[in-house]
C-alpha cells in the first residue's frame, strides 16, 4: 500500500484533487491510501466546503487554517505545519497541484525531509516572474521527483530548463521523471458535464438561453485592485452587452464585488448596477460553473482554469491577462490574449462573433490522466 499526502489550499486545487481521489476510490483503493491536507489558504464555507460535498471528495484529514496574509508569513506557516503532518503520517510521497503558495509550501516541506514530491500540472510557464504563481511553479518543479505535465508545451519548458526527457529510473529529486499525461481537469469536465446537465438549475434561475449569454470571471489582484484596469474591463463589457443586446453573467467573490464601488468610476458603477444585460452573481459551485461554461456563447476570464474549461467545451475565450500559461489555446486561435485593454477586448469579441469555424484540437489527453498518474506513482514510488 502506497500512502500519498495530498496538499490542497484553494478552490481550483480542490477540484483538481477530485479527479485523483475519484480514481483512487474507483480503481486503486486497495493499493493507494490518500491523506488529504487542506492548508486553509483560501478557506470559507461557500468556497471550500461546498466543493467537497458537491464533488464527492473525501473530507480533509487535516485543516491547517493558514488563512490569507503576506506571502512570506503565509508560506512559512504552511511549511512548518505541513512538515509536522509529514513527520506524523510518514507518507511515501506528497502530491501537490498547480501553482499556489500551498503548492510551494508542500514542495519545500517535503523535499527538505526527503519525501518525494509529485507535481500535477508541472512545466507550465507564463514567462512572467512578476506573478507569484510563476515563482511557485518553477520552485516546485525543481524539487519534484515525478512531474506530470498536462501538455506537450509543458514538457518542452521543462526540457529547456535542464530536465531529461528520456531518463531511466529509479527516479528521485536528482533524477526526476517528466510525463505528458493529459489534464486532470479534462477528466473532471467530462465526468461532471453530464451531472451538470441533470442537476444544475443556474441557467433557468437566471433566465439564460443556450448560446445567448457571455460568461465572465475576474479575480486576479492586478485586475480587481487596480482602478484603471478594472474600469477598462467593465467599460468593454458594458459596451459589448449594450451594443449586442447580450447578457453577461459575472460570478464574483464578495471581496471583488465590494471593490467595484470603490474602484469603478461612479458613472460606470451606476451603469453596471442598473444594466439590463450585466448580471453579477455570488460565487457559483463547480457544477454550476460547468453548466455556465458549457452553454455560453463565449467566455471572458483572467483565470487559467476557466480558459481551459472554455476550450474543453469548445467555447472561444478572451483572456483578460497580458499572457497565458496555456499557450496552445492561443496557437489554436480559439483564445485571444487582450490584457485589460478595452479596444483589444472589443476587437476580440467582434472577431469571434464573425468567425465561421474555430479550431479546438485534442490537446489535453483522453480523460484518464488521473489513472495514468496513479499507475506511475505505484510503479515508481516505494
Image (tube, helix red, strand yellow):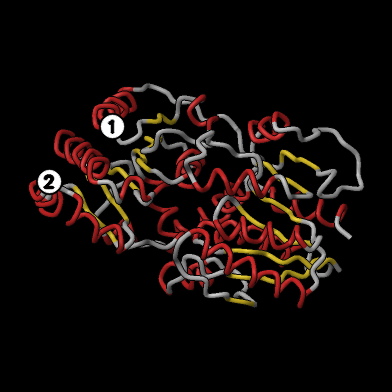
User: Of residues 331 and 118, which is closer to you in this image?
Assistant: 118
Looking at the rendered image, the quarter that the N terminus falls into is bottom right
Is 284 in front, or is 156? 156
Residue 381, percent across and down?
85, 57
Q: Which residue is mark 1?
A: 341
Disc nearer the start of the sequence (1/2): 2
Kindly tell me whether residue 265 is visible in this rendering. Answer: yes
Where 172 falls versus 43 (above or below)? above
Is residue 103 left or right of 181 when viewed as pictured?
left
Q: Name the quadrant containing residue 6.
A: bottom right
Q: Secondary structure at mark 2?
A: helix
| Callout count | 2
Q: Is residue 293 above or below residue 39?
A: above
Callout 1 touching callout 2 (CB < 8 Å): no
Q: Residue 177 in the image: x percent, y percent?
A: 80, 43
Residue at x-position 52% and y-position 65%: 74
Q: Spatial distance from mark 1 to mark 2, Cα to Cα?
A: 16 Å
Query: Does residue 198 appear in the picture of this structure?
Result: no
State the residue at coordinates (87%, 47%).
Answer: 171
Residue 56: quadrant of the picture: bottom right
Q: Nearer the viewer, residue 248 or 236?
A: 236
Q: Nearer the viewer, residue 263 or 177?
A: 263
Q: Which mark is residue 280?
A: none
Residue 176 % position (x, y): 81, 44
| Residue highlighted by disc 2 | 268
Q: Which residue is rendered at x = 60% and y = 33% of the image?
A: 362
Rendered location of residue 45, percent (x, y): 43, 74
Instruction: From the viewer's perspective, tell me whether residue 71 is left or right of residue 319.
Output: right
Amino acid at each position: 500500500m502506497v500512502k500519498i499526502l495530498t496538499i490542497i489550499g484553494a478552490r481550483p486545487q480542490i477540484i483538481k484533487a477530485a479527479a485523483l481521489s475519484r480514481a483512487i476510490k474507483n480503481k486503486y483503493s486497495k493499493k493507494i491510501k490518500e491523506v488529504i491536507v487542506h492548508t486553509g489558504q483560501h478557506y470559507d464555507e461557500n468556497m471550500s466546503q461546498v466543493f467537497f460535498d458537491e464533488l464527492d471528495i473525501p473530507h480533509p484529514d487535516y485543516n491547517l487554517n493558514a488563512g490569507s496574509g503576506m506571502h512570506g508569513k503565509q508560506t512559512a506557516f504552511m511549511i512548518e505545519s505541513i512538515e509536522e503532518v509529514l513527520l506524523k503520517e510518514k507518507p511515501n510521497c506528497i502530491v501537490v497541484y498547480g501553482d499556489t503558495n500551498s503548492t510551494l509550501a508542500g514542495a519545500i516541506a517535503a523535499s527538505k525531509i526527503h519525501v518525494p514530491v509529485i507535481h500535477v500540472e508541472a512545466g507550465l510557464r507564463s514567462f512572467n516572474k512578476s506573478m507569484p504563481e510563476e515563482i511557485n511553479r518553477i520552485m516546485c518543479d525543481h524539487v519534484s521527483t515525478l512531474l506530470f505535465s498536462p501538455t506537450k508545451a509543458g514538457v518542452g519548458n521543462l526540457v529547456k530548463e535542464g530536465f531529461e526527457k528520456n531518463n531511466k529510473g529509479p527516479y528521485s529529486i536528482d533524477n526526476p521523471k517528466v510525463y505528458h499525461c493529459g489534464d486532470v481537469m479534462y477528466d473532471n469536465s467530462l465526468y461532471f458535464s453530464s451531472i451538470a446537465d441533470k442537476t444544475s438549475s443556474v441557467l433557468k434561475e437566471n433566465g439564460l438561453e443556450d448560446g445567448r449569454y457571455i460568461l465572465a470571471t475576474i479575480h486576479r489582484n492586478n485586475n480587481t485592485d487596480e482602478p484603471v484596469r478594472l474600469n477598462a474591463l467593465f467599460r468593454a463589457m458594458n459596451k459589448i452587452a449594450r451594443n449586442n443586446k447580450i447578457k453577461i453573467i459575472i460570478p464574483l467573490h464578495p471581496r471583488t464585488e465590494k471593490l467595484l464601488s470603490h474602484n469603478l468610476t461612479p458613472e460606470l458603477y451606476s451603469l453596471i448596477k442598473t444594466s439590463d444585460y450585466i448580471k453579477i452573481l455570488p460565487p457559483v459551485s463547480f457544477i454550476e460553473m460547468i453548466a455556465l461554461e458549457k452553454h455560453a456563447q463565449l467566455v471572458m476570464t483572467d483565470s487559467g482554469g476557466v480558459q481551459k474549461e472554455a476550450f474543453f467545451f469548445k467555447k472561444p475565450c478572451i483572456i483578460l491577462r497580458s499572457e497565458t500559461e496555456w499557450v496552445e489555446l492561443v496557437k489554436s486561435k480559439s483564445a485571444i490574449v487582450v490584457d485589460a485593454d478595452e479596444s483589444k477586448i472589443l476587437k476580440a469579441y467582434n472577431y469571434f462573433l464573425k468567425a465561421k469555424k474555430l479550431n479546438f484540437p485534442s490537446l489535453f489527453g483522453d480523460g484518464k490522466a488521473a489513472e495514468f498518474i496513479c499507475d506511475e506513482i505505484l510503479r515508481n514510488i516505494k
